[in-house]
Amino acid sequence: MNPELIAAVRERIALGHTDEMIKEELIQTGYTADVVEAVLTEAYTATVASVVPVDKRELVGAGELFQLGWSFAQKYAVLGILLAIPFSIVEISRHLALISGSLETSRMLSMVGVLTIIAFVTQLFLVTTTFRVVAEDNGSQKVLVAAAWQWAKGRVLGLFWISLLTVFVVWGGLLLFIIPGLIMLLSVYFAQYVYVVEGQTGMNALLRSRELVKGQWWVIARRLSVIGFIFFAIMLGVGILAGIVTSLVGETGLESVLWSVVLVLGEQLLSGFMTLILLKIGMELYRSLASGKPATVAISGAGKGTYVALGLLGLLFPIIILGYFSTIASLSSFGTETVDFLSDEEAKVRAIKLRNIADFE
């Protein structure tokens, strides 16, 4: 039996890959079902006999993480373009409809609504595909996007559900003021990676992410903060450049229309490539954390009730925010109501009239 193949399977077992994921990968590579079963059996036997199944990876710095992300984005530029397409179509259609005035407002809103729903669903599949590509990319052999798309078809709902759980838990933390929200944000940051790589579903993925981040919160926070600053600087520079060009082009004429389309495409392309970079950075951080804390058979359920409670509390977050802004709008409109105040002369005249009436009586 090929020792290198067994070692590769052992590493995947240590990182939490399910048997189904390993079998699917080996069969796609060209191995028969019988060989796959034999390799799995041998790998599990060797794993039990070994104390250290995989070498621990050190956490790299923010600069190196960004470089890895940028290299990945260049390597899979086609994915960045695909990620930009869905909402580019929505924005360009909306913009051209507004400029031409050829559609009634109700029809335009209906068209944009339908296109937005289609774009959202398509984007979910594309993001799930990208997660798979990031998980399978080893730096040497290029992952087939078409194969990753096929894998994504059966996992998109699971990834979407974990994303919703993550959002609600973070919102619940934000309702307990900013600091708990930030703690929750980083604690569940790797839940989607856990789902894609280890196959953990639902709340277990969030709990596994918490285990990975435990003891490394500030280390991860510093790296992600630096990455966030880099992205902010890039967007600021692009925004300034776009503003200068817009002022030169003007707001009327064919040039303005063409430039508005270019702006939409540029914005979506930037978003697509930033998504590739961020997902690669997240995967590198996840791999480093997981190498030091291999996945166990059962995820500890300690604190699960807290996460459930935060998730339920997070359901109220949109309602509270809408109520807050509605109240602010109401108070603002109340403050702008016209109030008639008497001038000094009018006040004197009225006072004289009231005095005359009193003397008459």
Image (cartoon, rainbow, N blue to C red):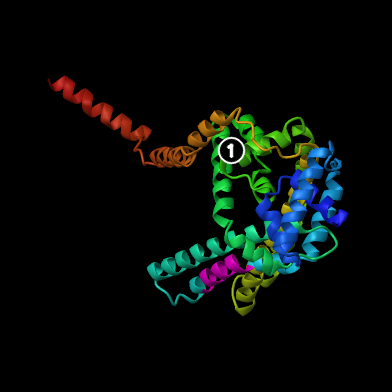
Q: Nearer the viewer, residue 322 or 164?
A: 164
Residue 92, magenta (yes or no): yes
Across and down, in percent, residue 297 comes to 67, 38
| Residue drawn at the location 38% of the way across and 39% of the way down | 334
Magenta stretch in the rendered image: 85-96
Q: Quadrant of residue 61?
A: top right
**Magenta part, dominant SS:** helix
Which quarter of the rendered picture does the C terminus lie within?
top left
**Residue 228 in sight here:** no
Is residue 44 toward the left or the right of residue 167 in the image?
Answer: right
Across and down, in percent, residue 87 comes to 58, 65
Q: Quadrant of residue 338?
A: top left
Residue 144, magenta (yes or no): no
Across and down, in percent, residue 136 comes to 75, 58
310 vs 265: above or below: above
| Disc 1 target residue | 170
Q: Secondary structure at mark 1?
A: helix
User: Mark 1: few, some, or many residues within 10 Å (few <14, many ≥20)?
Assistant: many
Total labels drawn: 1
**Residue 352 in sight here:** yes
| Residue drawn at the location 35% of the way across and 35% of the way down | 341
Is residue 198 toward the left or the right of residue 91 in the image?
Answer: right
| Residue drawn at the location 54% of the way across and 29% of the way down | 305
Across and down, in percent, residue 106 comes to 38, 67
Q: Amino acid at mark 1?
A: Val
60 vs 213: above or below: below
